[in-house]
Image (cartoon, grey):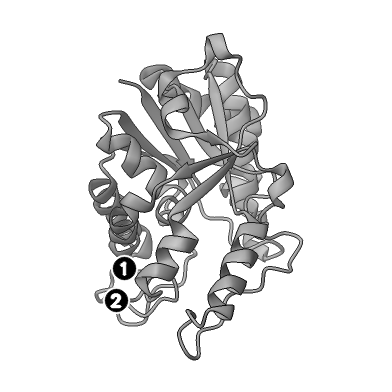
Amino acid sequence: MGTIVSFHAHPDDESIGSAGTLARAAAAGHRVVLVFATRGELGEPVPGVLEPGEQLAMRRSAECYASAGAIGAKRVEFLGYTDSGMMGEPSNDAPFCFWQADIEHAARRLAVILDEEEPDVLTTYDDNGGYGHPDHIQVHRVGKRAAELSVVPVVAQGTINRDWMVRGVRGMAESGGLPEGWSPPSFDEPTFGKPEAEITHRVDAVDFVEQKKASMRAHASQMAPDHFLIAMPDPLFAMGMGVEFYIVDPVPSPAATPDLFEELFTPLR
């Protein structure tokens, strides 16, 4: 059996972007490890969810372990940086935030875990961090360098397939499958995801959408029961969240391709 290490910026990122892939890997007997750059201190908590005096960072850290249990991960680690906030905010300049981290130093921190785990696959984000968040962009940069330091065979950059989402929502709308009053997020932002032509692989995780939704629910400080993702009708959730997309560049040669990668990741072309 193999090992997959999934590197994320904040608690709950794993549930939205790669929980299906990770749950499928765990169900097949592979070892799954979660690594978070920050504890998401600057997230907006759901109103009323925190106890008096409770720190958001503490709650979100605990939620990571609950999410790990939902998807079958065996280890959770934090690199120790603080949340940088959204791009352009003053918090981007805080000296210990992840956005300000020295790439080489942060990569060495991650490489310690990679050296211990010897993963077949490391998941990160695409070069724009999926939607332009500074900590997500930094995950791409730090993950890429850490993989070089630890000689990880495959780096899979998690991304959003913009064309897939547009086709799916359009098809549901034409068939009358969208719930009344539900409106999708804007897919027109150039920072939102990647065009399908740039995406190399997909992971079919439709059979694991319940684990994915359980992972999301574990992050109750960020996702209320009426959060638009959790509240999606089951068919829409399966369509939109049951397939996860990645950019793998370079693709390993056939002789060097780990079994875990071949088992989970399907080429788009």
The local crowd at label 2, few if under 14, some if 14 to 19, many if 20 or more residues have their Cα within 10 Å, is some
Q: At 35% across and 34% down in the image, what residue appears?
A: 33
In the image, which is nearer the foreground, mark 1 or mark 2?
Answer: 1
Residue 162: image quadrant is bottom right
Q: What amino acid type is highlighted by mark number 2?
A: Val
Q: Which mark is residue 231?
A: none
Disc 2 designates what residue?
Answer: 49
Furthest-bottom residue in view? Answer: 181
**Which type of secondary structure does the marked residue at label 2 adopt?**
loop
Residue 12: image quadrant is bottom left
Provide residue 214's location: percent of width, then percent of height.
Answer: 28, 59
Q: At 40% across and 54% down in the image, what residue appears?
A: 15
Q: Nearer the viewer, residue 59 or 32?
A: 32
Provide residue 98's location: percent of width, then percent of height.
Answer: 57, 46
Whether the residues at callouts 1 and 2 have beta carbons within 8 Å, the answer is yes
Left/right of residue 1 with respect to residue 253 in the rendered view:
left
Q: Quadrant of the C terminus?
A: top right
Disc 1 designates what residue?
Answer: 220
Residue 116 shows up from this direction: yes
Q: What amino acid type is highlighted by mark number 1?
A: Ala
The local crowd at label 1, few if under 14, some if 14 to 19, many if 20 or more residues have their Cα within 10 Å, is some
- Give the CA distance from mark 1 to mark 2: 8 Å
Residue 10 shows up from this direction: no
